[in-house]
Image (tube, helix red, strand yellow):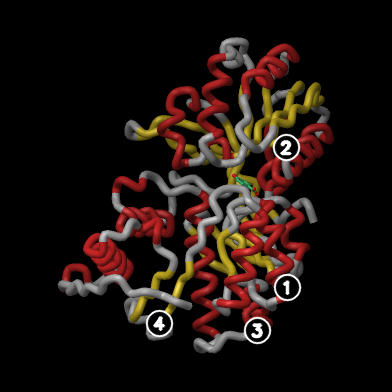
């Protein structure tokens, strides 16, 4: 593979850090990169040797993770990189996939190469139907949007405009919000779709304002666009006109929420994870995230949790297979996989290979000086309503 080892270093684990193998590995990698003068983003190959978890001898002695950064929604690049990973590097799993177009482009590569593909974000319902090797551990947009239609009705909202990003997950969000909202007697007076790349929300905001809905249902992908959206909403005077935002949690994801700030206060959204979720598993996750990434990394979000759970699922497969990889056996193990995640109980539906999980209704509040999505209701365990 033409790998060049630039530098090697060793750190000694004192007894104090005996309980955090991950921290030791991260510290060693950081020291090594520092000494080699190599920025982490230039890293192509990371080899973790001898990373053992406490009392868990099933941990593979040697695991390698090959990282490729697609750099935004770029399906052609994703497909080419997936092909290289499967045919040249002979990887055992393809994992990641932030955006739907990348996941859709890579799915045929997973089928062709008989390689399990774990989706850690991309959330258009249809993705799991595109290859028998795809398993999703994140969310689907119908799963988080349908409950918002019901919640709006129950809370006396009758007249709504929708505004979504114009691609797979946005269209799923619009469709499934409308379905439950109109079934409950609500009216969608206008549906606006904005382009995925570099949207200027101002003109769209004016259109929503002119339609005078009681609330606007929103999906935008969890990127800096959330900040741009909330800014435009305020600047265009929609809040002052009394229009409420109801959204999927993508708009108010925990990593960006402090930057959005005051404008988010009181906004209600539906989603599967909030960093304010009160459980021992979430506390352990928040600590592990802070230990591994340091304070400058900021808050984890729902994508971090999907990655964490995805790695746990892979770990479970490796352990069950005793370190010998077999794609079909791996799929059999992943189907029906259950885990107590930082978000609550999760399961992979054996039929659809899609995530089953609790969806929460949350409101942004200030807790200990920080803006947080505080869960106040839930709709129980939900399969993808899009299937
Ligand atoms: C996607 O499927 O492209 C997607 C879904 C939800 C997000 C971001 C991207 O927040």
Quadrant that contains the C terminus: bottom right
Residue 290: x %, y % from top left: 33, 53
**Residue hosting label 3:** 329
How far apart are the alpha carbons under marks 1 and 4?
26 Å
User: What is the secondary structure assignment of the residue under circle 3?
Assistant: helix
**Are discs 1 and 2 less than 8 Å apart at CB?**
no
On the rendered structure, is 96 left or right of 369?
A: right
- For marks 1 and 2, give the CA distance: 28 Å
- Number of marks in the rendered image: 4
Separation (CA) of disc 4 from disc 2:
43 Å
Which residue bears the numbered disc 4? 62
Left or right, 156 with respect to 303, comes to right
Q: Could you tell me if residue 9 is visible in this image?
A: yes
Residue designated by label 1 = 111
Tag 3 and tag 2, C-beta contact below 8 Å = no
Question: Quadrant location of residue 262?
Answer: top left
State if disc 4 and disc 3 touch (CB < 8 Å).
no
Q: Which mark is residue 166?
A: 2
């Amino acid at each position: 593979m033409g790998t060049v080892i630039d530098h090697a270093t060793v750190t000694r684990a004192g007894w104090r850090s005996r309980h955090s193998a991950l921290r030791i590995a991260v510290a060693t990698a950081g020291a090594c990169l520092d000494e080699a003068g190599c920025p982490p983003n230039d890293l192509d190959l990371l080899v973790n040797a001898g990373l053992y978890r406490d009392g868990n001898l099933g941990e593979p002695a040697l695991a390698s993770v090959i990282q490729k950064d697609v750099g935004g929604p770029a399906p052609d690049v994703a497909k080419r990189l997936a092909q290289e990973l499967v045919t040249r590097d002979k990887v055992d799993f393809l994992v990641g996939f932030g955006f739907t177009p990348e996941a859709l482009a890579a799915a045929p590569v997973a089928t062709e190469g008989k390689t399990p593909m774990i989706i850690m974000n991309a959330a258009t319902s249809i993705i799991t139907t595109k290859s028998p090797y795809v398993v999703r551990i994140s969310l689907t947009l119908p799963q988080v949007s349908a409950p918002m239609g019901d919640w709006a009705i129950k809370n006396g909202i009758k007249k709504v405009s929708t505004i979504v990003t114009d691609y797979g997950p946005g269209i799923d969000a619009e469709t499934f919000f409308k379905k439950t909202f109109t079934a409950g007697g609500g009216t969608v007076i206008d549906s606006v779709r904005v382009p995925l790349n570099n949207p200027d929300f101002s003109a769209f905001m004016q259109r929503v304002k002119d339609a005078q809905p009681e609330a606007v249902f929103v999906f935008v992908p969890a990127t800096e666009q959330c900040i741009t959206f909330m800014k435009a909403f305020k600047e265009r005077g929609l809040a002052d006109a009394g229009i409420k935002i109801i959204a999927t949690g993508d708009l108010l994801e925990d990593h960006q929420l402090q930057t959005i700030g005051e404008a988010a206060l009181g906004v209600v959204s539906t989603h599967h994870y909030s960093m304010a979720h009160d459980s021992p598993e979430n506390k352990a996750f928040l600590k592990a995230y802070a230990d591994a990434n340091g304070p400058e990394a900021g808050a984890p979000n729902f994508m971090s949790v999907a990655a964490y759970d995805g790695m746990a699922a892979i770990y479970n497969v490796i352990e069950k297979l005793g370190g010998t990889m077999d794609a079909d056996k791996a799929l059999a193990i992943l189907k029906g996989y259950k885990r107590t995640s930082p978000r609550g109980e999760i399961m992979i539906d054996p039929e659809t290979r899609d995530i089953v999980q609790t969806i929460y209704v949350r409101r942004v509040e200030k807790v200990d000086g920080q803006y947080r999505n505080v869960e106040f209701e839930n709709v129980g365990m939900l399969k993808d309503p899009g299937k």
